[in-house]
Amino acid sequence: MIIQIDFAGDLPLYSQLRDQIVIGIAAGLLKPGEALPSVRRLAADIGINIHTVNKAYALLRDEGYIVMDRRSGAAVAPRPLDSRGFFEHLADLLRPIAAEAICHELDAEQFGRFCADLHRQVRTVQDIREGHP
Amino acid sequence: MIIQIDFAGDLPLYSQLRDQIVIGIAAGLLKPGEALPSVRRLAADIGINIHTVNKAYALLRDEGYIVMDRRSGAAVAPRPLDSRGFFEHLADLLRPIAAEAICHELDAEQFGRFCADLHRQVRTVQDIREGHP
DNA sequence: CTATCTGTTATACTGCAAGTATAACAGATA
DNA sequence: TATCTGTTATACTTGCAGTATAACAGATAG
């Protein structure tokens, strides 16, 4: 699981880190129950401050993607995740993006297909990196 | 075209305004070539500073969604929009969201269908507000 | 018991974006 | 001339992002 941070990007570091971990979980590089590196370790590896990693972890915990224990550290949350309000959350995220697609004259089928294809792409990154068993 | 701004939200005002206008264009409430309110007028209507509106307009101009003229003001950009690099842009926006959907155990077809449905919903807001001609 | 790991919390500081406020300029128009 | 437009400049306040240092409580290995 390699974390790539763009220090020159416009997204906050903790937000980039959060995204990378969610993508890592989705790709299967981080499996449910699997332990994540400690905040100090990950901060040292990436070269950022502990609190920045802590902020990303706390955000992921609040969103339900990871669980944190004072003794055993952080770990990927077990399935199934609590999905109350998730579709509303998803709709809020997607609305401005769908609007952009409409402005660029993509119809619903094209947009849906693009989203599904990207879903499959994110889901199968592990196969590219680790080979097909 | 009603603009709704959440002053208590975590998104910057100029970013919310930008999203609202893009959604308005996508919904057909703002048609290509149609004039937008001046920065002073819109700022006064919403109750925010001129520079905040100006920042949103400048962002929309840089993204190609509107055109600005010193004499005639701002207007919705004519179709077709310049779509160079748009799919890469779209993929960057959608990747973390698709990852969230995967974590919540939505498969590619479900996710694609949800995105397509939301696309249609954004596209047909005008019909709800103005009736079907 | 000691040392070391874990997350958690507190404090303080720097840097920068966001937002506001005021002002002025150039160009178009009535 | 007066008034509209976008554009630019300056200055200020506020709050977030990120860093740095430190300490605490609990678990664990020696």
Image (cartoon, coloured by chain):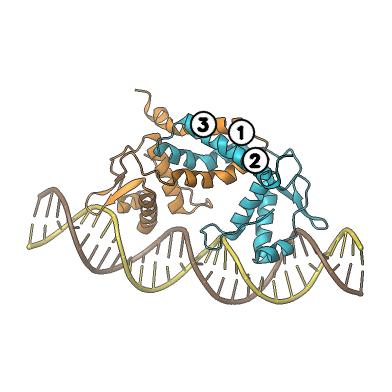
Chain colours: A orange, B cyan, C yellow, D brown
- The amino acid type, in three-letter code, at marker 3 is Ala
Q: Which mark is residue B123?
A: 2
In which quadrant of the rendered view does residue A105 lie? top right
Whether residue A4 can be seen here: no
Where disc 3 sits, the SS reads: helix
Q: Chain of mark 2?
A: B
Q: Label 2 near label 1: C-beta < 8 Å?
A: yes
Q: Label 3 near label 1: C-beta < 8 Å?
A: no
Between D2 and B69, the residue placed more toward the observer is D2
Q: Residue at x 39, y 53 (%)?
A: A59
- What residue is disc 3 on? A116
Q: Residues within 10 Å of mark 3 (few under 14, many from 20)?
A: many
Q: For the view shown, which residue lies furthest in the top direction?
A: A133
- The amino acid type, in three-letter code, at marker 1 is Ala
Residue A20 percent across, percent down from the top left: 43, 44
Compared across the picture, whether A131 is left or right of B3 comes to left
Q: Chain of mark 3?
A: A
3D distance between C-alphas at marks 1 and 2: 9 Å
Q: Which mark is residue A108?
A: 1
Q: Residue at x 49, y 29 (%)?
A: B109
User: Which mark lies nearer to you, 1 or 3?
Assistant: 1
